Amino acid sequence: MGRDAGERAFAEFVGAFALIFVGAGSIAVAGTAGGGLVGIAFAHGLVIAVMASAVGHISGGHFNPAVTFGFLVTRRIEPALAGVYWAAQLAGAVAGALLLELLLPNALTDAVSLGVPALGNGMGAGAGMVLEAILTFFLVWVIFASAADPRGTFTAIAGLAIGLTITLDILIGGPLTGAAMNPARAFGPELVSGEWADAWIWYVGPLLGGAAAALAYEWLYLRRTPSAPLGTPESGLDEPRPADAAR
């Protein structure tokens, strides 16, 4: 992997950092800025749309261990490179959460536990996990359809479809589970704030949902056009399409 893997990892680090800094930061300031759920949803969606468009040609623009896991189970990324991606994504999430903790007033961050996802009133842990799986299924499905599929529309719409999917998911799931859809989105704020209540939900749900979407799309639409595992010389692309398994 060498230098190429390092360049890709740094792109993933920056994307995950931006997601936490902007996404969790929008939750912290929502009370004073007045954006509410809509503002939070668009903050998360816009930061991913921008970052996927900006560095997708470098790393594939995953910024999410569940997305990387989807590409791993469909053999569109090498296991070693997937591990590098996961480390970079989690590190970026922690760095973003740490900077928010240092920069924002404690009154803002403490009130929302630094943006740690949480179950809404009346939501059980099992239902929350299933909802996170469903929301992540939508996200990874759109990533495969718009970016991994060579017939997709990624070159025309960049990361817009992916970012809007996150926005839509948060609009419905935000009040219920936080709509993390991303283990890194949960891990960074959890580690820095020390809030781990029902933490497994935001790891098991997204990983299951991401894998299910990736395998379903692969089996239904891509199995006749197999690609070499990303990160190998056989993959043959210097500029991976965002989410095209982060080559």
Image (cartoon, rainbow, N blue to C red):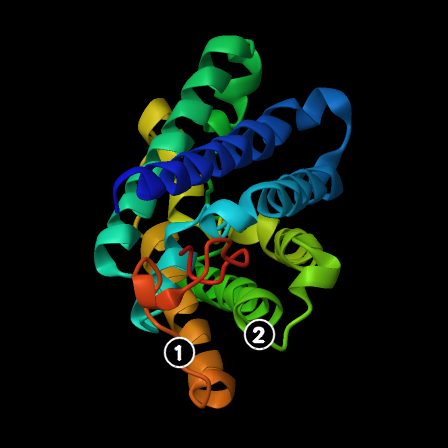
State left or right for residue 208 relative to residue 149: left
- Name the residue at 44% across, 59% down: 128
Decide if residue 208 is on the left or right side of residue 216: left
Q: Position of residue 110 (x, y in %)?
A: 48, 19
Foreground residue among 5 and 72: 5
Image: 242 above or below 108: below
Residue tagged by mark 1? 215
Identity of the amino acid at label 2? Answer: Pro
Q: Residue at x 71, y 43 (%)?
A: 42
Nearest to the observer: residue 21 or residue 26: 21
| Label 1: which secondary element | helix
Q: Residue type at mark 1?
A: Leu
Could you tell whether 50 is left or right of 137 in the image? right
Q: Is residue 198 visible to the viewer in this orientation of the structure?
A: no
- The number of callouts visible is 2
117 relative to 159 in the view: left or right: left
- Dividing the picture into quadrants, the one containing residue 172 is bottom right
Local packing at callout 1 (Cα closer than 10 Å; few below 14, some 14-19, many 20+) is: many
Tell me the mark number nearer the camera, choosing from 1 and 2. Answer: 2
Res. 242 visible in picture: yes
Residue 150: which disc? Answer: 2
Q: Nearer the viewer, residue 123 or 149?
A: 149
| CA distance separating discs 1 and 2 | 16 Å
Residue in the image at 37% along x and 24% along y: 193
Q: Secondary structure at mark 2?
A: loop
x, y (%) of residue 229? 32, 68
Picture coordinates of residue 232, whole percent (x, y): 29, 61
Among numbered discs 1 and 2, the one appearing first in the sequence: 2
